[in-house]
Amino acid sequence: MDFLKKLGIEGVNPGTSTGTQHFESKEIISSYTPVDGKKIANVSLTTKDQYEEVVAKAQEAFQVWKNIPAPRRGEIVRQIGDKLREYKEPLGKLVTYEMGKINQEGLGEVQEMIDICDFAVGLSRQLYGLTMHSERPQHRMYEQWHPLGIVGIISAFNFPVAVWSWNAMIAAVAGDVMIWKGSEKTPLCGVAIQKIIAKVLKENNLPEGIFNLVTGDREVGEWMTNDPRIPLISATGSIRMGKQVAKAVGSRLGRTILELGGNNAIVISENADIEMAVRATVFGAVGTCGQRCTSTRRLIIHESVYDQVKERLLRIYDNITIGDPLEPKTLVGPMIDQQAVDTMQNALKEIEKEGGKVIFGGEVLDEPGHYVRPALAEVENHYNIVQEETFAPILYLMKYSTLEEAIELHNGVKQGLSSAMFTLNMREAENFLSCTGSDCGIANVNIGTSGAEIGGAFGGEKETGGGRESGSDAWKAYMRRQTNTINWGDELPLAQGISFDV
């Protein structure tokens, strides 16, 4: 595996780092590829003492990093982007090999990291505040944004490098330092990233503690969420995990950015470009083997085109190439592990139990690795299994007759991440995007639910958590706001006309 060598991955890799320094421990975890189930390498777990050392270094580094002008911080991020360009191919292969998404998606994920670096570089000169008119004469008011401190980043296996970059690059230009705990299912991706950015840190003679890595299971995450020295936790994962994080961080009045479950739907109108809608649906449903938070889970189809869409999907699903994600012709790779496969199988049984019908796929393929055939099922929206997010390539089909009914079905779940409608009717499109339409953080017309661009703020409503990452003004969550009032006159008038003579 030449790409492992290029990334500096060895038999045993230190899972704790403060930048250029790496720390090993006696306890290790093994990373297995879902491609064929073979062990890739080992990573040492972060001990409590190592965690304390990381936090101490982060605190020290923050005192230096926050005083570096934002455009200069942006220059460091620019160099990180250039390093990612240099290592795009091997890093993309590692993402594919350790997580299981096809190589085009692995390369796409690294490109997303590069793109967010470019975005953050520009942002470093645009951390704008506002100027307000004061009610008091010869006074001026304005607001400004200051670095917050240590940002804790907890990411998931399905995007093992991109989610870190969304948070880390924005936090970096904001003047924050960060501690990253990636998924214990993809620990080598964290090791590889740390080795890449270490080169930039060394070349610029930057202190230890700006970009930190810890490795471990739930316990390490709890150290972070309960730590009052970390004012902001950005966590990506399940709704269950998010509620635990919110409770822990909220109990100490800390801040959270939560990007949790999605139960995303596409509405296909009778006025849709059917071919375009089907193509978007298939990518959304089977891309990353259905293991994206923005994966298409539900398909709400107008009754007049239901049979047409259904038959088209059946033909496409029957011809999808499933196999080694490193092979160029493969469209669907494996699921992450056996637990994920078992979860899918249990969901398929539950569909039948509740009265639904699996009309295609769902089988576990008899070959090394964790391969399944993507499934199609006819269901009703109120089924318990449909109401929950199953992190697997299962697409639920259901009918609607009126637009009002479609929107009611669409919004009738507790998750609110991504949504889409396919229609060539302007009134339908605008209705879907209005306050009476989709209740999700992302709402699209004539593109699918999956594959958000970094320029917009990414995140969802309801039990998706409400947090926003990446573009637009998401940067404000990583900074503290300060309102300033300056008196440039020789009198001291009070606000609200209060008289207080002494």
Image (cartoon, rainbow, N blue to C red):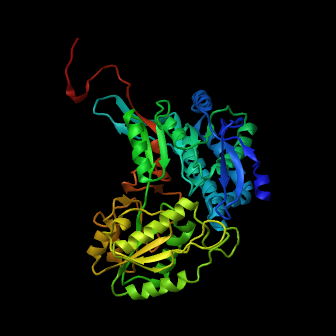
- Residue 500 in which image quadrant: top left
How many numbered circles does the render carry? 0
Q: Is residue 432 left or right of residue 495?
A: right
| Above-or-below relation of 378 to 184 | below
Q: Please tell me which residue lies in front, 312 or 29.
A: 29
Quadrant occupied by the C terminus? top left
Q: Percent from the top left, x then y, of residue 12?
A: 74, 44
Q: Please tell me which residue lies in front, 345 or 196.
A: 345
Residue 85 visible in this rendered orientation of the protein = yes
- Residue 87 in which image quadrant: bottom right
Quadrant occupied by the N terminus? bottom right
Residue shown at the point (39%, 74%) measured from the top left: 352
Residue 451 visible in this rendered orientation of the protein = no
Q: Percent from the top left, x then y, of residue 380?
A: 33, 74
Q: Is residue 216 left or right of residue 414?
A: right
Q: Please tell me which residue lies in front, 232 or 50.
A: 50
